[in-house]
Amino acid sequence: MGISSIIVNVGKVREMCRIVRRLAPRAAIVIGGHVTAISELEKMVDADHFVRGDGISWMRRYLGEDETAPIRHPEIVSGFDARTLGVKLPQTKGSVAATIIPSVGCPMGCNFCTTSAFFGGKGHYLNFYDSGAELYGVMSEMEHKLGAQSFFVMDENFLLHKRRAMELLDCMRRDGKAWALYVFSSANAIAQYTMRELVELGISWVWMGLESPHSAYLKLKGADTLTLTRELRQHGIKVLGSTIVGLEHHTTENIDAEIEHAVAHDTDFHQFMLYTPVPGTPLFAEMTAQGRMLDGVDLADIHGQDRFNFRHAAISREDSKRFLDGAFRRDFERNGPSLYRICRTTLEGWLRYKNDADPRVRARFAWEARSLGSGYAAALWAMEKYLRRSNPPVGEKIRALRRRVAHEFGWLSRAATYALGPVLLWAARRERKRLAAGHTYEPQTIIERRNWTLPEARLDAIPTLLPVPEEL
């Protein structure tokens, strides 16, 4: 029985182990993932093996297999049950990006980064696919099996490995692939490429750390992130900026200016996270050695969206939550809903590249803008009406964008706006009331069976799992 988990879900891991012991007492329980960074995990959960770092090679050794054999990438869609404006979005084959994992770890080695620390720390990472040709083969397979035209690339700093990325681009050019890629990359890694290379590579969305203009992190050294994010958006590349609240140099006096700098990027999405020492990271070791870790903080609460789990030199634990929530609020009030910003960037890309000389580029931007004149146009109308009294400046910006969309897409946009817009406005208002009343959404349980055999063929192996029907 294999269980992989992040640290905050250690309580769930404990309960799953308890259930497995009851239902299948002869099963070997293997725990992997970031949860194994907890130093005393062996005392917290009842399991047989604890795998820290690369789990593929460990499992192959455990099973007596060749740990150097090629890796068969699993078929994974990147999301399900997406909702916007109170409406569940339809999900058809190929409508959701396929997840691709080229590498794990990050050589930049930021002191707070759990992924970097888990796979060797600064200067280390683990490539599953070292060449662009190998990666292209996996993506082609997912295109065939899942119908994917877009790929969520789960790699901490995908564009840092330029050789692999450019080899992938060569393969895409050769076969005329107009794929869209959603990637994680640092500012300095992105700066290795021209905008034309990024566009031809299909970079559609990039997660980028915007920790602080005064941070000492190598990935931001010398980077003009304000100019970079603006240029990316002008070329239709959506940006998720990630900013840390509560760095060591932050004080109650300068935190406002730091948040203001982050908000000024006007990224399509913005994630704010508390500076959080997490087990296994250099930051956790440092804070522990200094005696600054707080007692009594539940591991389930160290996800970066609650309060500090350590003693900050200048900001109290209660103030950390106030500054964090205030950062999100300021970004929303200043820059508007992310859905509006996505539409804005998508339109910029469409207008710039709809008549591009490269048919691959034209095809990708046509695919990305496929809903701009219909569903997105209606959503813009709903957002405009929703915010026109509570935030008139943002409501006016949304109105201006909606008119640009209507001008570009004509009667289709206007028809969708007046047919669907009022419905989406009603749904958004209903959703607000439901959430305010305490309604929450929980993901469905997903069961995947591999190498599954009929119960009668394996009764001797699983006597405690299921009751044996009398007719067998």
Image (spheres, rainbow, N blue to C red):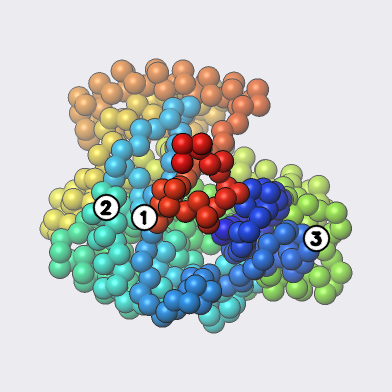
Return the residue at label 1: 75
Cα distance, mark 2 to mark 1?
A: 8 Å
Which amino acid type corresponds to the residue marked 2 in the rendered image?
A: Lys
Return the residue at label 2: 145
Secondary element under disc 3, as helix, strand or loop, is loop
Give the residue at x 18% y 52%: 362
Sequence-first disc among 2 and 1 = 1
Which amino acid type corresponds to the residue marked 1 in the rendered image?
A: Glu
Cα distance, mark 3 to mark 2?
A: 46 Å
Which amino acid type corresponds to the residue marked 3 in the rendered image?
A: Phe
Nearest to the observer: residue 356 or residue 180: 180
Q: Is residue 181 visible?
A: yes
Sequence-first disc among 3 and 1 = 1
Observer-side mark, 3 or 2, equals 2
Could you classify mark 1 by the number of other residues whose Cα lies within 10 Å: few (under 14), some (14-19), or many (20 or more)? some
| Rendered location of residue 363, percent (x, y) | 18, 50
